[in-house]
Image: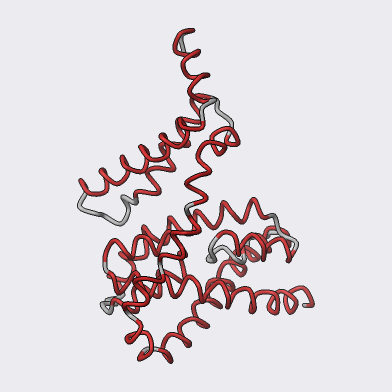
Amino acid sequence: MTDPLAEIWVYLSASPLAALTLTLVAYQAGLALSRRLGGHPLANPVLIAVALISGLLLVSGTDYAVYFDGAQFVHFLLGPATVALALPLYRQLATVRRSALAIGVSLIAGSLCAILSAVGIAWAMGAGAQTLASLAPKSVTAPVAMGIAEALGGLPSLTAVLVILTGILGAALGPPLLDLLRVRDWRARGFAIGVAAHGIGTARALQVNETAGAFAGLAMGLNAIATAILLPLLWQLFVSL
């Protein structure tokens, strides 16, 4: 950077408003590109925004902690946004009641599959216990996953990264995979995305169909509870082998 540009950037990077604006602009750019590409699953707005922000922070040499000081207001809004998922779920309450048995079976199967497949593959590749503990809750929403990982002896920071990657990949690759498997029922599609890809997948499901979004939000919440119960039990069994 030239000296004037460097001075301007130092001023802007020190302002909390700059990081917040960058976050919003990057997401709007990702959303615009996604719409231009016809909403293609691989053109996920969150993935595009993460790439844009990461690239700018890397090029400018800005520390993530400095960026987060300004962008943390968006992080704060994750709580109200999660609570707001109750609205589409309430609208689909009758459908949820009729599907209670299928939901229960799918939840246990999906939660176990997410845990066992991740840990099994990583263990076969020679990952250590700490890495396995960090990876096991990767399909659960970040605050819960980090708490579970810490309790099992994992690294919460590593778990946070894995959770984000899981959500982005699930939101991007989940719909094409479900199409390939000819899963047409919006309830099944939404629940599968919610179990596998937590909040990011749920946001994607809501963009596509309200029923899918409602079931994805339900799956995200139930999977957090199921994983918090099942994973410590499975982990005790694993470490005793």
Image coordinates of residue 124 in percent, x first then y, are 63, 65
Q: How is the image coloured?
A: secondary structure
Residue at (44, 13) in percent of width and height: 5
Q: Is residue 208 above or below residue 47?
A: below
The quarter of the displayed image where residue 178 is located: bottom left
**Residue extending farthest top:** 3
Q: Is residue 96 above or below residue 140?
A: below
Residue at (50, 24) in percent of width and height: 60
**Residue extending farthest right:** 240
Query: Which is nearer the eye, 88 or 230?
Result: 88
Q: Quadrant of the C terminus?
A: bottom right
Label tally: 0
Image coordinates of residue 126 in percent, x first then y, are 68, 60
The quarter of the displayed image where residue 125 is located: bottom right
Image coordinates of residue 21 in percent, x first then y, are 41, 35
Q: Work out whether residue 109 can be spotted.
A: yes
Q: Work out whether residue 132 can be spotted.
A: no
Residue at (46, 32) in percent of width and height: 17
Q: Is residue 179 left or right of residue 163?
A: left
Query: Which is nearer the eye, 22 or 129?
Result: 22
Image coordinates of residue 54 in percent, x first then y, are 48, 36
